[in-house]
Image: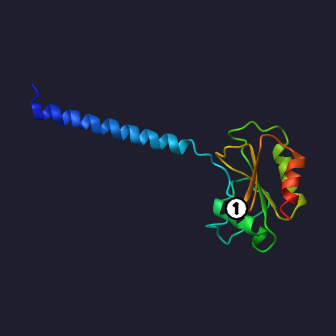
Amino acid sequence: MLTEIQKRKIRNWSIFITIMALVIGGIYLLVSSIKTLPPTDIIGHIEQSPSSHILKEPMPIKMQKHMLEHSDGKGKPGVVINYNCNDYQCEEGLVNNLEGFAKKYDNVYVAPFKNMDAKIALTRYGKIEVLDSFDEQRIEQFIQNGY
């Protein structure tokens, strides 16, 4: 038979475990609801450029920030077009169409972005535009408005 002290210890530990579970659950819900989008600032960037304007692997965030500052580490401010075809269904030819902008402009970069909360995100310093599908005119305007 349990003594009064043992019953209090069990009760106190039960309350503690319940409160901790609620706190941890609340933190998890808060963190999981935060949207993951590419950066639009240059704080914490690194002085390193990607190997190409068209990347098949995600561009590191610190490097993306550097490209927003100036493309290829010396040119005009860059535009980064990120896409997420892992979590979104991308229409056939989407990636090739996006890569066409990197071929057309010397300050545009195209790269996948894992776990991004958008299919397509266009970024330049201080600005982001999210697209649900390929829209050549909107992308062209976004790039041109950065000059």
Q: Is residue 59 above or below residue 2?
A: below
Residue 88, given in percent of the width and then of the height, sits at 72, 38
Q: Quadrant of residue 59?
A: bottom right
* Quadrant for the N terminus in the image: top left
Residue 70 is left or right of residue 140, and the answer is: left
Q: How is the image coloured?
A: rainbow
Q: Helix, strand or loop at disc 1?
A: helix
> Which residue sits at x=10%, y=31%?
4
> Which residue sits at x=75%, y=36%?
89
Residue 95, given in percent of the width and then of the height, sits at 81, 46
Q: Is residue 123 above or below residue 11?
A: below
Residue 106 is left or right of residue 120, and the answer is: right
Q: Quadrant of residue 42?
A: bottom right
Q: Relative to the observer, which residue lies in front, 127 or 65?
A: 127
* Quadrant for the C terminus in the image: bottom right
Residue 48, given in percent of the width and then of the height, sits at 69, 70
Q: Is residue 50 visible?
A: no
Label 1: how many residues lie within 10 Å, few (<14), some (14-19) or many (20+)? many
Q: Which residue is mark 1?
A: 64
Amino acid at pointer 1 = Gln
> Which residue sits at x=83%, y=64%?
107
Q: Is residue 143 above or below residue 114?
A: below
Count the labels in the image.
1
Q: Relative to the observer, which residue lies in front, 112 or 45?
A: 45
> Which residue sits at x=22%, y=33%?
11
